Every structure is written in structure tokens, then in C-alpha cells.
Image (cartoon, helix red, strand yellow):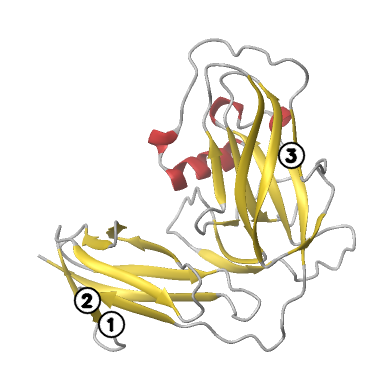
Amino acid sequence: MRKVIRMAVTAIGAAALVTATAAPALADGPYNATVAGQRQYTPLVNLATSSTLTVDVVNLPAGVGLYVLHCKVPADPRQPPTVCDSSTGALAYLTADAAARPTVAIPVKVNGEFFGTNPNPTTAATGESVDCRVATGDPRSTTCALYVLGAGKDSANPTYLRVWPTVFSAVKSDRVTDKATISLDGKVVTRGVPPKLALNKAVPFSVTLASGLAPSVSADNCSITDGKITALKSQGTCIVRITSTGGRNYKPLVTTQVFRLTK
């Protein structure tokens, strides 16, 4: 389980992690987490293509943080998940606190389809498209599940592990393929020769989808913040990955845009 927590920390940024220095104070009563009143291992059924669920936690001891992730269930369900939804709002992190908390609510976005990645890759970042509606062949198991995991020093502690299988409602069979429009410095990027990015020069950048859905955007060798893209190297390429979780009328989208890096 320690591996799963390290990968989540990588995705969010290690600076967000809070570590308690004193021995954890005990909460009144046993720790537990539920979703819509459902205990772990209870399937969450009839879920919309994309929705926000709330994990309700009770009696969380001091010095304990939590992660909430929606992931593809591993081939061996006893192993930690390594293909998790990396889209906006789909990974929740509750920092540790110096005081015990009797109750806390953690919202997390849960998508029926997503581009799954390993938040702690040991090699170059890769991923796969996950459709949680695909049958596993075993009526007792689901393709995806919502996980609650302890953070930091509690990453290997089974006390804080909770799992809920997720079951999503059917979608239209004739959904439309989504399309991304990329703008760089106010101009629409067209297919062909990759546009240039100069080292450390922030340039206005935006992505809009025909569906109106909010895309998730990630990149290597460049950063994308506050509506601007900045090259982090003076040579090579920057690959921007654009994904969407799809919806009732649109299929999920996974596409990339390459930029040439210059001085």
C-alpha cells in the first residue's frame, strides 16, 4: 500500500503533505468511512457518467491524512491500484491535522470513463483509457472502484483502507466523438508543423472541447498554469496530453499536441 501513497503524493506535489511530529492522538470511537451511507465493499450503483460523491469519515485520529482515488481494479484485487483517474477533481487529498477529527467530508469526482495513469510511475509516464462499464466476466466484481487510503506513514496501514465498487448507468450508443480546439497566443493551432515555444517564455494557452466539458491537460518539458504555457527546456519537444471523461452525448477524448522547444 505504501507504493500507492507515494504515487498520489507525486501527482499532487510533496509540499502538500503534512507530517505530524507527535504521537497521534486517539479519536473517540473507531475510524470509519462511508459513501452515501454505504459501508465499504457495497457497490455504488446507478452512477451518472460523471458526478461528485462525498466520502464521510468519522473518528479520524490526529496526524492521519487520507487519499481518495477512483481506479481500475487490479487483476489481483489484493494488490494496490496503479491505474487511477488523473482528471480534475478525481483525486482528493485530506491533509493530516494536529487534532483528531470526529467528522470530515471529502468530495471527489467519479467518472465512468477516464484516462488512467499511475501517480507513481517508475518509468516514463504512460496511461490507458478505462471504461468502468466493461464487464469483468465475474458478476461479483467490477472494473473500477473508489479507494480511501491512509497517507504518509499510514500508507501501509490497513486500518484506513476502504473500497467501494462502482457501477455506472448505460450511455447512448451513438455518442459523438469530441474535438479539442487549442489556442496559442490567441491563435488556433492547426495540424501540421508543431508550433514553437521559447525557453521560460510564458505564452497564453487554452483548450476548449466541442462538448463543452472541461478538459484535463498535462505536459512534459513544459508547464501549464494560469492560462499560460512555458517551455522548461531549450531543445527537444513538449507533448501536451488533453483528455476528457466523456458524457452522455460525447465519447471520452484522448489527444496530444506537440510543441518544439527553442532558446
Question: Which residue does the numbered mark 1 point to in the structure image?
Answer: 189
Label 3: which secondary element: strand
Q: Amino acid at mark 1?
A: Val
| 256 or 53, nearer to the observer | 53
Callout 2, which amino acid?
Gly
Label disc, if present, on residue 207 of the rendered structure: none
Dot 3 or dot 1: first in sequence order is: 3
**Which of the 4 image quadrants contains residue 218?**
bottom left
Label 3 or label 2, whichever lies nearer to me, is: 2
Residue positioned 74% across, 57% down in the render: 75
C-alpha distance separating marks 1 and 2: 9 Å
Q: State whether residue 228 is above or below residue 9.
A: below
> Where residue 170 sits: x, y (%)?
77, 74
**Splitting the image into 4 quarters, where does residue 125 fall?**
bottom left
Q: Relative to residue 236, is residue 57 depicted above or below?
A: above
Residue at point 32%, 70% (across, down): 206
Q: Which residue is mark 2?
A: 186
